[in-house]
Amino acid sequence: MRRPPFWNIRTGPGVIYTTTNEAPPIAFMEFFGDNGKMVYQNGSLKLYSSKVPIPEFTFSTKEMWASPEIIEEKLELPQCQTGHKEIIRNFCRSILFGEELIAPGEKDIWSVEFINALILSGKKGKSVDIPIDREEYEELLSGLKKISRGKRVKASPSKKQTPQVAAKSYIFNGTTTPASVT
């Protein structure tokens, strides 16, 4: 995977937290690198660039509470539908009508590789390269499987919606009339 020159993910530990059960729901991501950070929040993307690489500034400053000079820049994002609903709708429309996929598997595999790298790095306590060492990752998973225990959960009452009905509502933007497919 080619890393953009702005980011160096080898400088320290990383954290990723994700959930689909937040109240109130908020879309927030924060990425840190040697030269600053990028913050996405509810449709807005900001880039905070440091004139001097942060590790270099940290080790060279003589002041106790100093911060490097930061340039804040609001980046424009194209307006488009996003989220699970849109991805599923697009996937169904691709099958039915040949619509181009917005999340093709050959690109999205890098999201999985990124998460695998975070898991491997966190569990091993060291930096890892992307793509990760498959053998090392498989060894980690095998070890985790050996110490894991099953979790008992109560079955929830089933919803009265078939997969076909759910697919129709995604494909047709919330209605089942083909007129709204465009």
Image (cartoon, rainbow, N blue to C red):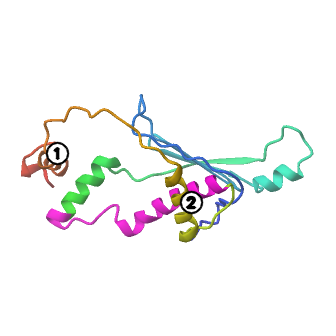
In the visual, does 111 lie left or right of 155?
right
Q: Closer to the camera, 180 or 11?
A: 11
Residue 31 percent coordinates (x, y): 59, 50
Q: Is residue 54 above or below residue 128?
A: above
Which residue is rendered at x = 71% and y = 47% of the image?
70
Measured as percent of width and height from the top left, residue 11 is found at 72, 57
Q: In this rendering, is residue 156 above or below 107?
A: above
Task: Kindly tell me whether residue 5 is visible in this rendering.
Answer: yes
Q: Residue furthest right?
A: 62
Magenta stretch: give its range: 95-124
Q: Is 112 left or right of 161, judged from the image as shown?
A: right
As helix, strand or loop, the secondary structure at mark 2 comes to helix
The magenta stretch spans residue 166: no
- Residue 1 visible (yes or no): no
Residue under pointer 1? 166
2 or 1: tag closer to the N-terminus: 2
Amino acid carrying label 2: it is: Leu
**Residue 89 x %, y %:** 23, 53
Type of secondary structure dominating the magenta stretch: helix
Which dot marks residue 140?
Answer: 2
* Closest to the observer, 153 or 55: 153
Q: Nearer the viewer, residue 1 or 181?
A: 1
